[in-house]
Amino acid sequence: MGHDALHDEVPTLSGAFAPVDRECVITDALDIEGEVPADLNGLYVRTGPNRRFAAPGRYHWFDGDGMLHAVRFERGRVEYRNRWVMTDGLQEELAAGQALWQGIKDPPRKDRPDNPVKNTSNTDVKYFAGSLISMWYLGGDVYRCDPDSLATLGKLSTDPRLFGVPISAHSRVDERTGELMFFAYGKTAPYMHYGVLDRFGVLKNFIPVALPGSRLPHDMAITPNYSVLHDLPLFQDADALAAGRHKLKFHGNTPARFAVVPRHGRVDQIRWFEASPTYLYHVSNAWEEDDGQGGIEIVMTGTPFRIPRDAQGGLMYDEVPRLTAQLAHDFYFHEWRFNLRTGRTRERVIDDVINSEFPVINSWMQGFQTRYSWHTLMGPALRAEEPRFCGVVKYDLLRGSCQTYHEGPNMWWSEARFAAKEAPQDAPKDLSSAEDDGYLVGFVWDGDAHKSKVVVMDAANIAAGPLCRITLPVRVPNGFHATWVSDARLKRGY
Ligand SMILES: [Fe+2]
């Protein structure tokens, strides 16, 4: 089959999206343009879909088996490796020598209530309790992987209370305490659970969060004292469900709701806040502020969908499911404020000009007020189901300004992470004084040169372009989320 024929088939299986068929370790013969900063020490690891076996039926970008791609920086030395997450589903398929599950566009397996849709563990990766943890957006077992070899070590929790609990992607690690705050959502009441594992992986809190019905939350937020959970009005149409069909609907008359719960709180401490109807995948950050009248306000920032409007300015909610299916969203940057004293929500647009997603902060500052947020620029899609991550933007919330960087239409970015400069030996923490005193590290596929590159940028000045580009002899397919784990954290173990 010629390249063009393949290209015409499924955008997310071709070009920069095409899966790779081998695992490798590359320690030398890397082509480095510029200089790798000596105070950049740690691990950048990005996950994404990488289908191992072709399945009958229709492919969706979210279907591929999770593969980790890691770049280790050590005093100017750079090493790349990639490895599949050895999920139960992938192991079964390897044993069978073929695909045993179809993707999300086709019906789930009725004979496998334990795994009706294959948990590909392809969505999110974090560092927790000495391991990388690999998570899936539909929720399921979380896999632990070795930060050095990327080998799958096992599953996250052996606590029987968590057996069968579908822990979702975007559970969040507090780097200062080492705790993992997680949520799990499902199709049966109470529809959501929330929990906390301590830095050794011991379950410290686990409570039901009753929702009005089955929902599709994607992310959560944490502050030192609170967690924020999402109940958003993009969910299955009840009439269609009753008739046995799945039809996503945006319920434009239903408010978005956010639960604020004390980190170690009880069910009766959950506070619900209503906001204008919206859907968001990703939170940038959240923090606690004094409201000036003795109350606490929880501030949360993120990148919700921009709802399309008709010629009269009316919101076209019915368009949202189609845009979702085509991965063709326009996102903007937004702020919510949940006042624990008054019970009221205030919200504002931070920026509705630039289409950006995959918000990233200096992760040491998670839960504390942040000035900067680095996002992926979303270019106009060339075709349906071909989202284009075309560069990066850095927001300055103090000034209300931003800086962008992109270098042409055929450069395909991945979520780039902030890496603080390594502190001097005698410094107590791995954090420099300034929030943006560090680097932005990510992958770029150069579609003209047909090369994957690791880029390192000055996080304070992304408009200056990469400080260095490391060309890899292998391709890194487009993917989802990434994490940066500093040397200090690797040594500390959380
Ligand atoms: Fe996500």
Image (spheres, grey):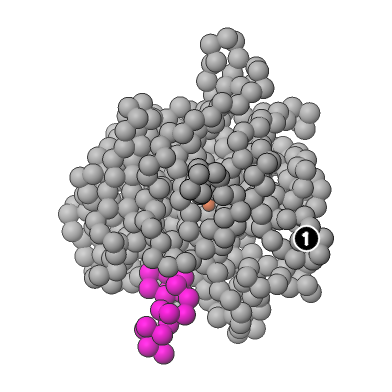
Which secondary structure dominates the residues rendered in magenta? helix
Asked whether residue 145 appears in the rendered view, the answer is no
Residue 491 image position (x, y, % from top left): 44, 44
Tell whether 251 sits left or right of 354. right
Residue 361 horizontal/vertical position (percent): 42, 39
- Verify whether residue 9 appears in magenta: yes
User: As drawn, is 368 to the left or to the right of 219?
Assistant: left
* Nearest to the observer: residue 141 or residue 312: 312
Q: Number of callouts in the render?
A: 1
Task: Respond yes or no on whether mark 1 lies under 8 Å from ligand 1.
Answer: no
Query: Of helix, strand and loop, which one carries label 1?
Result: helix
Residue with the mark numbered 1: 241
- Amino acid type, residue under disc 1 in the picture: Leu
Residue at the spot x=57%, y=55% of the render? 319
Question: Residue drawn 22% across and 53% down?
Answer: 468
467 horizontally vs 1: left or right:
left
